[in-house]
Image (cartoon, coloured by chain):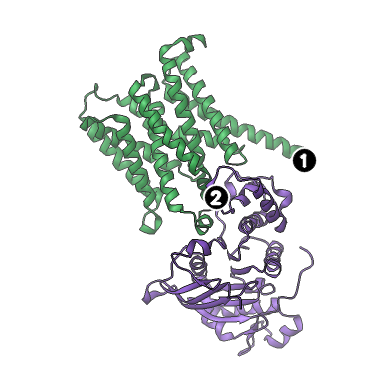
Chain colours: A green, B purple
């Protein structure tokens, strides 16, 4: 452990990774409640288009990717079944189209301009000071929006029609949620990459889902599991020299499996005692 | 003179050549329990959506408590209505405590991260009213379908609405849970003076509890008050060749057995030209 903490690279990565874990796990509760897991996959892959545009036009990577992700997420938010296409199909279309655009744009870039492996699978160990700044700039609005809209989002996930009838501007809150999910996806790309980002946004709440009894408990459990998975993942990746993003996601998968198994055991035992 | 709680003035919805609702006129006093029946696609849910402001009528207007529902009065007036839509699958998978489900019905729920302590009493009262006080701390997912529906009703009642709209609230409930729910709605009308509009498919199930039944299929074919007979032609207009199924049920459930004998053929179909009655709502069940 002392070697891990003594490593300058790891120390530099720990703070941003912790911030990503906090933001991702907080939003993961809403992602699961609103069944947006596939949307996060779609938006994360669509950010490749943003990264491609940033490389071609020499723009900063993270802000350009963030704008692209938010636009894609909002586009998905305004496409409703009434307009002849459901969200699932729209996500598939935008995901494929934006990813293809990103690949075409990046194909002309040199290896020095873009670290494709890092983009696809994440590399928090190479985070720059500028990345840290943009990460903070992206995380603060996500957390502020979550603080402000957590309750309406939660109630909408439970029963959107009733909330609309009560006068809640459901469509406005929905678009805000999509935009914030889009922004969160980009925050996660540095740690888990385009391919694995959905893991950070789904696994923490999925592990907490069976144990939570409400919004607050769901958030707290999700946060604790996410932090544990991220820190342990970084440590394991350091000790065994593994890719950090993939190791963190693998650890979160392990947490998910343990959570499900423990829940099954607890209920199995309770059922056994009641018979 | 107290104005009616709800008045629909020639309300239509949909394009002129293919109306979903056409010229609906309805009036509802406080304490009145109205059942709306009709076949699939009759516009029943659409009507509820128009009343609670989710849809705008293409023609006509709505008066609530004697005031026309307009852009200016909309928020204030609709705040006195609560709508219980059909159940969604997502509800039964959400990790939410029962008392927190009820809290979602509070007017200022979405304005704060925590609700003030005074709301705790209102939540408790709503749960008490629906017989779910003992389950307040339970996980909503662990409740039966009937209990979940009662909790949703408590959520609608926590803000003390003057009008309650329900879209097939008894769908997927067994007969006992259905009767218990309808009885509770009847009590709300009688004791709290709440006006209730409930969409149901099964007239037989609701006829003991409602004050009147509106037969809807794009337009109101008939609005039968308590004890009034529904002409056979109304069933025929609404259900076509399948009319005997609905008319037969309505006849049997609401009437005493000897009355059926006089008004039915041997095969149980309503006698030709004999209207089916909407039975009186004074029969009370004593227990679930």
Q: Residue furthest bottom?
A: B273
Decide which of tag 2 and tag 1 comes sooner along the chain: 2
Residue B192 visible from this viewpoint:
yes
| Number of marks present in the image shown | 2
Between A169 and B273, the one lying in front of the other is A169
Residue B229, by quadrant, is bottom right
Mark 2 or mark 1, whichever is nearer to me: 2
> Which residue has dot 1 on it?
A274
Chain identity of mark 2: A
Chain identity of mark 1: A
| Residue B112 left/right relative to A178 | right
Location of the C terminus of chain A by quadrant is top right
Residue A106, by quadrant, is top left
Please state the horizontal and vertical placement of residue A5, each as a whole percent of the image: 48, 12
Please state the horizontal and vertical placement of residue B60, each as a whole percent of the image: 44, 75
Q: Regarding mark 1 in the picture, which secondary structure is present there?
A: helix
As drawn, B206 above or below A84: below
Please state the horizontal and vertical placement of residue B282, each as a whole percent of the image: 74, 76
Q: Work out how far the residue at label 2 is from the one at label 1, CA to CA, in angstroms.
A: 31 Å
Identified at 72% across, 55% down, the residue is: B128
Mark number displayed over residue B70: none
Identified at 68% across, 63% down, the residue is: B181
Residue B98 visible from this viewpoint:
no
Please state the horizontal and vertical placement of residue B33, each as a whole percent of the image: 64, 72
As drawn, B39 above or below A239: below
Identified at 71% across, 53% down, the residue is: B132
> Which residue has dot 2 on it?
A158
Identified at 48% across, 67% down, the residue is: B50
| Residue B123 left/right relative to A137 | right
């Amino acid at each position: 452990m002392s070697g891990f903490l003594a490593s300058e690279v790891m120390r530099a990565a720990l703070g941003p990774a912790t911030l990503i874990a906090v933001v991702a796990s907080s939003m993961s509760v809403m992602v699961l409640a609103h069944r947006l897991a596939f949307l996060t996959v779609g938006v994360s892959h669509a950010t490749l288009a943003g990264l491609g545009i940033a490389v071609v036009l020499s723009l900063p990577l993270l802000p350009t990717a963030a704008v692209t992700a938010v636009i894609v997420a909002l586009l998905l938010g305004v496409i409703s079944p009434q307009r002849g296409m459901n969200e699932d199909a729209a996500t598939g279309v935008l995901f494929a189209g934006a990813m293809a655009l990103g690949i075409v744009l990046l194909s002309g870039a040199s290896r020095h301009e873009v670290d494709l492996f890092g983009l696809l699978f994440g590399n928090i160990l190479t985070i720059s000071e500028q990345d840290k700044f943009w990460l903070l700039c992206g995380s603060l609005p996500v957390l502020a929006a979550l603080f402000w809209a957590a309750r309406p989002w939660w109630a909408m996930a439970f029963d959107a029609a009733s909330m609309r009838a009560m006068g809640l501007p459901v469509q406005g809150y929905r678009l805000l949620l999509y935009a914030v999910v889009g922004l969160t996806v980009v925050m996660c790309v540095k740690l888990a990459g385009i391919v694995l980002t959905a893991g950070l946004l789904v696994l923490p709440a999925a592990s907490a889902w069976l144990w939570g009894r409400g919004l607050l408990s769901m958030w707290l459990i999700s946060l604790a599991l996410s932090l544990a998975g991220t820190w342990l993942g970084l440590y394991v990746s350091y000790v065994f020299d593994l890719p950090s993003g993939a190791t963190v996601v693998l650890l979160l998968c392990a947490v998910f499996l343990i959570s499900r198994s423990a829940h099954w055991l607890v209920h199995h035992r309770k059922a056994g005692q009641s018979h | 003179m107290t104005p009616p709680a709800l008045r629909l003035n020639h309300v239509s919805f949909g394009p002129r050549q293919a109306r979903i609702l056409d010229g609906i006129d309805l009036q509802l006093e406080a304490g009145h329990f109205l059942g709306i029946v009709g076949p699939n696609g009759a516009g029943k849910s659409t009507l509820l959506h128009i009343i609670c402001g989710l849809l705008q009528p293409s023609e006509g207007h709505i008066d609530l408590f004697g005031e026309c529902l307009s852009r200016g009065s909309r928020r204030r007036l609709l705040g006195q209505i609560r709508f219980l839509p059909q159940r969604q699958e997502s509800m039964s998978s959400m990790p939410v405590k029962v008392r927190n489900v009820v809290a979602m019905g509070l007017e200022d729920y979405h304005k704060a991260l925590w609700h003030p302590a005074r709301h705790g009493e209102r939540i408790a009262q709503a749960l008490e009213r629906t017989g779910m006080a003992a389950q307040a701390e339970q996980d909503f997912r662990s409740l039966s379908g009937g209990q979940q529906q009662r909790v949703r009703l408590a959520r609608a009642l926590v803000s003390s609405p003057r009008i309650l709209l329900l879209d097939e609230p008894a769908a997927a409930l067994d007969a006992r849970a259905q009767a218990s729910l309808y009885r509770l709605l009847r009590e709300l009308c009688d004791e709290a003076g709440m006006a209730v509009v409930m969409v149901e498919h099964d007239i037989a199930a609701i006829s003991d509890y409602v004050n009147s039944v509106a037969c809807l299929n794009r337009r109101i074919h008939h609005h039968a008050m308590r004890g009034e007979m529904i002409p056979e032609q109304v069933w025929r207009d609404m259900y076509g060749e399948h009319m005997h199924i609905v008319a037969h049920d309505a006849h049997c459930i609401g009437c005493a057995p000897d009355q059926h004998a006089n008004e039915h053929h041997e095969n149980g179909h309503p006698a030709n030209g004999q209207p089916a009655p909407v039975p009186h709502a004074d029969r009370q069940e004593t227990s679930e």
